[in-house]
Image: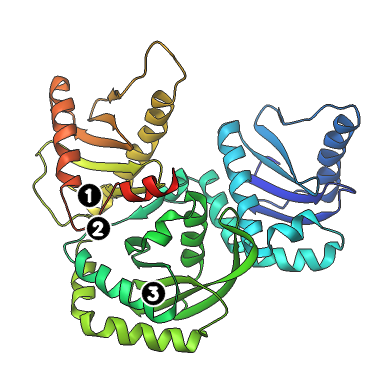
């Protein structure tokens, strides 16, 4: 297994029958004998009323997770951490639910038809597994379990068009993406669970070359038993309008209505693309700020700008620093200590500094150049957060949604 970066296999709980095997990186998939051995160890422990959750060798972690007494997901991955492997398994399980439905998993009797249904989830499963292959893939916020968003001056105009579009096709769940980032969305879209939003965003990513698509899905939390349709139409290059709807209208009608709703503001759409790759339509940031990552925790969305003071060549490096630092900051902020709850953390390196601040539902991480005084970072971070939140075109915090769900 030395050349394999990561493997995820799925087998039945009852007999260990293989359902699928996916890998990332070089090398062959896990041989059937190895899969059988891994399942056998788990089954032996279960017979002794012991639940085997993880094991490790010199170079690899092995994670087992059983769902609904029906399927077992086994992840064999490099020692990048048990938490990461468990997060990957959890997302893959929800992706399976989204494509086959909760009832099909709970009542799994005939393996062959189930295997055929699960194949539709393979592209999304492969996207989820990319977090194991950071050497060949750019680190991005989707690896944090977040939906990436963008802010632009045209958001008010785009929101009016979005509301008109969803009314026309009879749904409450619609959103517009620019370069894969959510620019505007309805309250119904933001109200579904974060992991549902993320998997739907991954579906768009896997079908980015399609002019339009219509995918039958289930929402694991919001609607696990009743099938819905996830439809998407490309308006112009890099801009898509997307919606969740029932059996009607058909894709042809939705495509026609989308062009009718959005064609009057086609120039506005083209201008909105110009905000990339900076993600914000403002240049009023402090000179020491090189990039930032803003996260809304309850809604599960983020806004990243990794190119304020850097070239495109250095943008990838900046995003990697921000995402890595966010992992650190989130652990600091969720530390269970009744005597002290941290709200700030920072790193100091030779060529840069990083500072993070938690305020209400938001966590912001800022990449500074090394020359900024460490004592000034708190003030500049809070100033930057207020500047971003003052962009009134998009309601970042969704306070009204929290009131409705509490």
**What secondary structure is marked by label 3?**
helix
Return the disc, 3 or 2, that comes first in the chain's sequence. Answer: 3
Look at the image and tell me whether residue 163 can be seen: yes
The residue at which mark 1 appears reads as: 307
Residue 139's place in the image compared with 126, above or below, is above
Quarter where residue 342 is shown: top left
Distance CA(mark 1)–CA(mark 3): 34 Å
Q: Which residue corresponds to the image point at 58% horizontal and 53% vertical from the top-left?
A: 221
The residue at which mark 3 appears reads as: 166
Distance CA(mark 2)–CA(mark 1): 7 Å
Q: Position of residue 313 (x, y in %)?
A: 27, 52
Q: Which residue corresponds to the image point at 25% horizontal and 58% vertical from the top-left?
A: 277
Q: Position of residue 323 (x, y in %)?
A: 37, 40
Return the disc, 2 or 1, that comes first in the chain's sequence. Answer: 2
Residue 219's place in the image compared with 7, above or below, is below
The residue at which mark 2 appears reads as: 277
Q: Position of residue 55 (x, y in %)?
A: 72, 28
Quarter where residue 56 is shown: top right
Residue 346's place in the image compared with 243, above or below, is above
Distance CA(mark 3)–CA(mark 2): 28 Å
Nearer the observer, disc 1 or disc 3? 3
In the image, 342 versus 25, the foreground residue is: 342
Q: Dot 2 surroundings within 10 Å: few (below 14), some, or many (20 or more)?
A: some
Q: Dot 1 surroundings within 10 Å: few (below 14), some, or many (20 or more)?
A: many
Look at the image and tell me whether residue 5 can be seen: no
**What secondary structure is marked by label 1?**
loop
In the image, 78 versus 231, the foreground residue is: 231
Asked whether the beta carbons under mark 2 and mark 1 sit within 8 Å of each other, the answer is: yes
**What secondary structure is marked by label 2?**
loop
Picture colour scheme: rainbow
Report the side of 131 relative to 104 (left or right): left
């Amino acid at each position: 297994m030395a050349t394999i970066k990561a493997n995820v296999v799925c087998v039945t709980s009852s007999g260990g029958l293989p359902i699928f095997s996916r890998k990332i990186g070089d090398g062959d998939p896990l041989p059937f004998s190895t899969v059988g051995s891994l399942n056998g160890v788990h089954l032996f422990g279960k017979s002794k009323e012991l639940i085997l959750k993880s094991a490790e060798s010199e170079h690899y972690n092995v994670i087992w997770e059983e769902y609904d007494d029906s399927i077992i997901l086994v992840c064999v991955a490099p020692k990048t951490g048990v938490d990461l492997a468990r997060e990957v398994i959890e997302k893959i399980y929800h992706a399976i639910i989204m494509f086959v439905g909760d009832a099909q998993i709970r009542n799994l009797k005939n393996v062959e038809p189930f295997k055929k249904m699960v194949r539709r989830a393979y592209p999304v499963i492969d996207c989820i597994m990319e977090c194991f292959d950071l050497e060949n893939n750019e680190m991005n916020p989707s690896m944090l379990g977040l939906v990436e968003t963008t802010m632009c001056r045209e958001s008010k105009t785009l929101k009016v068009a979005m509301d008109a579009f969803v009314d026309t096709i009879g749904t409450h769940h619609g959103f517009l993406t620019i370069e894969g980032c959510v620019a505007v969305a309805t309250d119904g879209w933001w109200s579904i669970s974060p992991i549902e939003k993320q998997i739907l965003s991954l579906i768009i990513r896997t079908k980015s070359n399609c002019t339009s698509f219509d995918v039958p899905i289930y929402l694991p939390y919001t609607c696990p038993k009743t099938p819905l349709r996830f439809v998407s139409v490309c308006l112009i290059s890099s801009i898509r309008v997307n919606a969740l709807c029932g059996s009607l209208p058909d894709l042809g009608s939705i495509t026609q209505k989308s062009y009718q709703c959005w064609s009057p503001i086609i120039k506005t759409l083209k201008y909105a693309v110009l905000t990339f790759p900076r993600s914000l339509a403002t240049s009023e940031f402090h000179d020491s700020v090189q990039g930032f990552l803003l996260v809304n925790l309850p809604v599960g969305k983020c806004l990243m700008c990794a190119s304020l003071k850097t070239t495109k060549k250095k943008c990838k490096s900046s995003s990697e620093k921000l995402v890595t630092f966010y992992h650190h900051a989130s652990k600091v902020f969720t530390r269970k200590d009744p005597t002290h709850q941290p709200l700030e953390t920072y790193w100091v390196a030779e060529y840069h500094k990083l500072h993070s601040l938690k305020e209400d539902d938001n966590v912001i991480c800022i990449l500074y150049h090394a020359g900024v005084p460490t004592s000034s970072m708190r003030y500049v971070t809070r100033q930057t957060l207020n500047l971003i939140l003052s962009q009134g075109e998009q309601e970042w915090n969704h306070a009204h949604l929290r009131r409705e769900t509490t």
